[in-house]
Image: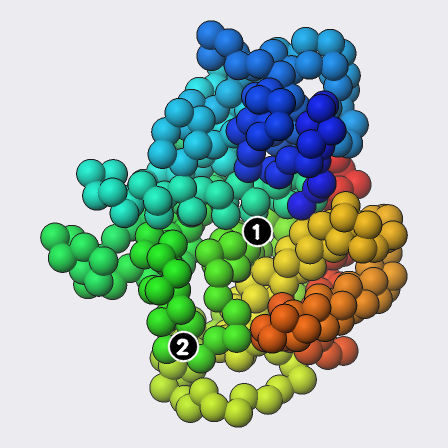
Amino acid sequence: MKHFYCLCGQEIFVNNAFCDKCGRDLIFDPMAQTMWSGVLMDNQFIAHTKPLAGESPAQKNNMLLHPCSNRYSAIKCNWSTSSSDDTQCISCKSTRMIPDQNDPKNAHRWMVLERAKRQLFMTLLSLKLPIEDFHQTPGGLAFEFLEDKRSNPNIMLDHVLTGHSNGTITLNAAEADEGFLHVMKEQMGETYRTILGHFRHEVGHYYWGIVINDDYKLSQFRELFGDERQDYGEALERYYNQPKRNFKSSQFITQYASSHPLEDWAESWAHYLHIVDTLETAVSYGLSAYEPKINDFDNWYSEWARVAQTMNALNRSMGLSDAYPFILTEIVRAKLHFIDYLIDGFAKKG
């Protein structure tokens, strides 16, 4: 996550729609990965002078941008659209279903879910990963935020489970409630559970079929993660029926990763995105001097280890649990290195 300042000098954050100090309107341009300040007029955004961070090919006075139509909805999206023909930004238009907005709680849930999804999209775009529009491409990336009887007794479904199928990521909207999220974390025996973590994990399933695109990469995958052809349902049934206490393994980044090779991949993918985003934040806020490069995994990981140690120490100073309570063993690092190699391939194409 990058660090931004308004033209007036006030520090602003990526979800801000206006500057608290000078009152200028703000908009985030996802394709340029920067924020602009200016004025919103007649459903158009007139950006002033220059972007607030990074570089853009359109650095000129009074650049015209088009705000996402959800800027005026409950989620208060502050992104711009990809073109004047689009009414929604690249993140918002990927949402296919939302919870019933007649329930006031669902407006807040939708806002929380979309905010996490925008953060996901920022990372995907910065890595130059392809994002297929489900409106145009069968199996394109889509999100459905659903309810079940636990949060809405009028719903037919007893349980909505987080998952991915043919490009569609499903998430229980109640996960946006901190209480529900905490209960699920305790029930599942997890050390980390967030909406952003869900998104990063599930999008790993989506990208598996995109980045593992030839026989050589598939053989590399199987060497590291195992054979994905083993029965998925049986593997998860075995996993959920086994005791969860005192799990120790040098082969997996989390306990859930041990359930099936595709879950190991998705967990490893999620942690790769965790590291990319958090390290970018550390650099942006002056906590790290690392400069991202292609084919630079060893230096990238070494810097992450230093930053993670610092984060954990800061949390402990506040009496909190570790921000990153995971051990990246040699085999886990090899899996992350493989993901880095695959993603670098898309960066080179870009």
Q: Quadrant of the C terminus?
A: top right
Residue 218 picture location, percent across and down: 64, 62
Comparing 295 with 322, the one in front is 322
Q: Residue at x 71, y 24 (%)?
A: 8
The residue at which mark 2 appears reads as 186
Element carrying mark 2: helix
Which residue is rendered at x = 60% and y = 11% of the image?
46
Residue at the limit of the structure toward the front, as seen here? 21
**Left or right of 72, for residue 320:** right
> What is the x, y in percent for residue 143?
40, 44
With respect to residue 191, does 172 lie above or below? Answer: above
Instruction: Say whether disc 1 or disc 2 marks the residue closer to the N-terminus.
Output: 2
Asked if residue 200 is positioned above or below residue 98 in the image, the reply reads below
3D distance between C-alphas at marks 1 and 2: 29 Å
Q: How many marks?
A: 2
Q: Hey, what amino acid is under mark 1?
A: Tyr
Instruction: Characterize the local packing of mark 1: few (<14), some (14-19) or many (20 or more) Cα atoms within 10 angstroms.
Output: some
Depth check: 163 or 1 in front? Answer: 1
Q: Secondary structure at mark 1?
A: helix
Q: How is the image coloured?
A: rainbow
Residue 331, x across and y down, in percent: 72, 77
Residue type, mark 2 in image: Glu
| Residue found at x 87% / y 52% | 289
Please name whichever residue, 238 or 109, is drawn nearer the observer in this view of the structure. 109
121 and 132: which one is in front?
121
Give the mark toward the camera: 1 or 2.
2
Q: Quadrant of the N terminus?
A: top right
Residue of label 1: 207
